[in-house]
Image (cartoon, rainbow, N blue to C red):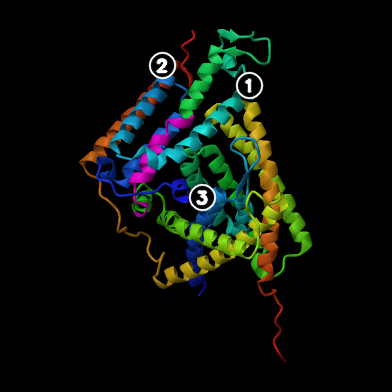
Amino acid sequence: MNSQLLIGYTARDTFLNRLSGSTKLIGFVALSIIGMVTYDTRFLLGVLLISLILFHFSKIKYHEVAFVLQVIVAFAILNLVMVYVFAPSYGITIYGTHHMILGSPDHYFNLSWEQLFYEFNLLLKYIFAVPLALIFLMTTNPSEFAASLNKIGVSYRISYSVAIALRYIPDVQNDYRTISLAQQARGYEISRKAKLMTRAKGAIQIIMPLILSSLDRIEIISQAMELRRFGHNKKRTWYMAQPFKRNDYLALIIIVLIVLVGIALFKVNGGRFWNPFE
Amino acid sequence: MNNKNQSSNSIRTVVATGIGAAVIFVLMKFVAIPTGIPNTQFNVAEGFLALLAALYGPVAGGLAVFIGHSLNDFVTYGSPWWTWVITDGLVGVALGLIKNRLNVTGGTVKTMKLVWFNLYQIVVNFVAWVLIAPTGDVLVYHEPAAKVYLQGVTSWIVNSVSVAIIGTILIVLYSRTRAQHGSLKKEK
């Protein structure tokens, strides 16, 4: 159960694995930002299609990510329902026309093609980056990820913080599980059977030792790093850093082109929305 | 001597950011209680953030929650919801700004200071979750205002409660383990 909750890096022999971490990071951030801003359905569908093709080539098996995908889809649907409940005629306001399916625009609850189209765009925005994120997470070695952060201009202290976070998440998770089992053995009930207050108290009995031991860990690690003269020089080199190769430059050019298309579409559409209703 | 202290403080900030982000990630993933409104949970992590920021300052607090929150979004929703991640980072910075005022490492924190701290965090959470985060959603993601402001208000309430209960308990418990400032006297 818990292994399904977390998805992580495994070495696979694909061209996506061989791309440098910096390329994948730049690609993910650039595409997710442009996709965040635009409401052009054609563009979002295009990016989704490209990321699905990449996902196919990444040799990631569906069952590895099935659980995560189900959660993502469930949340997306909940959000769409909530958008509809709170603003059922938001689409009409945005696109300026009304093609009704049910009811009339005068009623609070009505159903229009504009609303459906707007929510379809929202759905695309919620999910288009998911394949990219999964590819990024599952084909990038965490240590290389920190090196690539530093390469694209993030200060090496912050990159190192990220490296520490990625390195210690499994440890903290193990601690959590151990403490939880130990406290349950001592009789603290935290399962669904207990009352809410009992559960809350049980949770606090787990969190306290976890947090206090983590604070100890901060002291130990920072002393160890100080002994090794961390932070003495302005720059540092990374064991896992990868130099850019031909494929990296190719990928970067393609990413730049996609982003440029996205920006050009703002001009063409005269704004963020593509309006097929006019 | 002074210089050496500074460098060891900056190393501690780096490590506190990393470990803090890992703890925030685990707490967000395993110890979150849904409120019934999508994408808003009662997060124990916010309470921990209050202690982390009070101990290690604005840089560690802000970055730790920024990294922890985006990693959690990554593995739960597929991609980070940037407006909320950035807002959470700002909350971390704001909570870290009162590090010297609260002085957790200097021994037991007095009741007046705790009251003051809680008023401060409620205002910080209000500005962050009711003003900044939903406005960002409307501007950047073009979501309907009514929906995101409801999410914002809910987050404001649950996050303030989390800091008020769990954050305060953590700060009091932690400060009790520290020696009171000026509790030792030189023997004549």
Query: Does dot 1 land on a helix, a strand or a loop?
Result: loop
- The percent position of residue B2, horizontal first and vertical second, equals 52, 72
Q: Which residues are magenta?
A: A126-143
Give the distance between the C-alpha atoms of the residues marked 3 and 1, in whole angstroms: 32 Å
Query: Does dot 3 land on a helix, a strand or a loop?
Result: helix
- Residue most toward the left? A246
**Nearer to us: label 2 or label 1:** 1
Q: Which residue is mark 2?
A: A268
Q: Which residue is mark 1?
A: A87
Question: Which chain is home to disc 3?
Answer: B
Q: Is residue A167 left or right of residue A182?
A: left
Magenta part mainly helix, strand or loop? helix
**Nearer to us: label 3 or label 2:** 3
Question: Which chain is home to disc 1?
Answer: A
Q: Which residue is mark 3?
A: B68
Give the distance between the C-alpha atoms of the residues marked 2 and 1, in whole angstroms: 28 Å
Query: Does dot 2 land on a helix, a strand or a loop?
Result: helix
Q: Is residue B147 left or right of residue A162?
A: right
Task: Answer above or below: position of A85 versus A112.
Answer: below
In the rendered structure, does residue A138 fall within the stretch colored magenta?
yes
Amino acid on which disc 3 is placed: Gly
Amino acid on which disc 1 is placed: Ala
Q: Earlier in the sequence, mark 2 or mark 1?
A: 1
Both on one chain, marks 3 and 1? no
